[in-house]
Image (tube, rainbow, N blue to C red):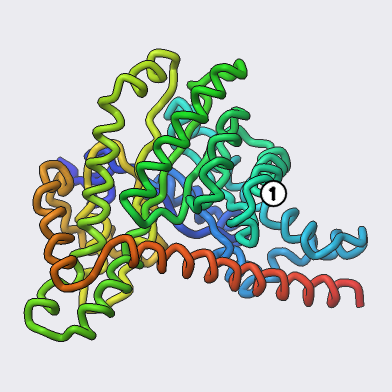
Amino acid sequence: MTVPTPLAELTAAGVSIWLDDLDRHRIESGDLASLITKDDVRGVTTNPTIFAKALSGATSAYSAQLAELAASGASVDDAVRALTTTDVRSACDVFHELWQSSNGVDGRVSIEVDPRLARETDLTIEQARLLHGMVNRGNVLIKIPATREGLPAITEVLASGISVNVTLIFSIERYASVLEAWMTGLEQAHANGHDLSTIESVASFFVSRMDSEVDKRLDAIGTPEALAMRGKAGLASARLAWGVYEKAMESDRWKALQALGARPQRPLWASTGVKDPAFPATMYVMGLVVRGCVNTMPAATLQACAEQGGFTGDTISDTQGASQHVWDDLMRLGIAEPAVCELLEDEGVEKFEVSWSELLDTVTKALAAARS
């Protein structure tokens, strides 16, 4: 009898494995297709940092398209949109068969709106629709950050019948608002005549960044009690978020939407690469196993899961009390979840803006070189 691989065990347990990485070489070399067949990868997420890395590290893969864009006189913003949507469209095609066989649940590829628009509701809506049209594939997800200004954009884009990946979620309170925005969007989509069964959504809850910030504060406190709490906040927050999701799925409001053909907005565990080498490389994967979630992981974390394993089954169900106890203990130490999450959101937007600037700079130089 064949022994299941750790990645196959995760899939069988109901965890949808997505890769948090994409570049043109990965697509054209067949590596992405291989990950689907060999490593149970069922989707891909991208963000400005990933695209900045792809364009700066492998410009040769983009040289032909860059030359065409330069010859056409494309602006740098238009060129970036053309380059990134081409990659996402191609990845969507690689995942097409899986998308169909999963009835539209998996086989999804995400592309994010310009992070400079994170505080601009109307412009976010406009660009989300633009990106959806440029990719022009049914299995694309448009990523919209869960800022206060992003929430009404999420509702409006879903109401247009467009599938959405809500990103940059840190706080439990904000996640509850995301669920509200999502259900309102589905209700409006139905009123607008859209088939709810074709609208997919995930809510990306960032995990490792929570530990990075909380552990820094614990280290500053320095007491044995504080140091014993290191590495606990991220998993506790994600597990509490799952509890909020479960309550939403029990509501009459959701049941009415479900009767109209709607599908759940699956919680997606993001930022699952371990930042602290003292922690196991797989802690944000094997520690967040439950049927019906998504875990998007960088290539190094995917490889660690494949090689190190550590699968122990469901690690989320029945953890609400213990997870709340973690945050109660942190509060007693003076670490408040709202303050941490507000800082992390601001930093998250800022980091993606920096990556976007790096991407614009790389493409500006590449276009100039192509024109010379």
Q: Residue at x 56, y 33 (%)?
A: 158
Whether residue 336 sits left or right of residue 138 in the image: it is left
Whether residue 160 sits left or right of residue 224 in the image: it is right
x and y percent of residue 297 in the render? 38, 58
Q: Residue at x 70, y 43 (%)?
A: 126
| Quarter of the C terminus within the rendering | bottom right
**Secondary structure at numbered mark 1:** helix
Residue where numbered disc 1 is placed = 123
Residue 87 visible in the displayed image: yes
Whether residue 84 sits left or right of residue 365 in the image: it is left
Q: Residue at x 29, y 28 (%)?
A: 249
- The kind of residue tagged 1 is Leu
Q: Is residue 50 above or below residue 220?
A: above
| Quarter of the N terminus within the rendering | top left
Q: Count neighbours of disc 1 (C-alpha within 10 A) and say few if under 14, some if 14 to 19, many if 20 or more.
A: some
- Residue 106 occupies which quadrant of the picture? top left
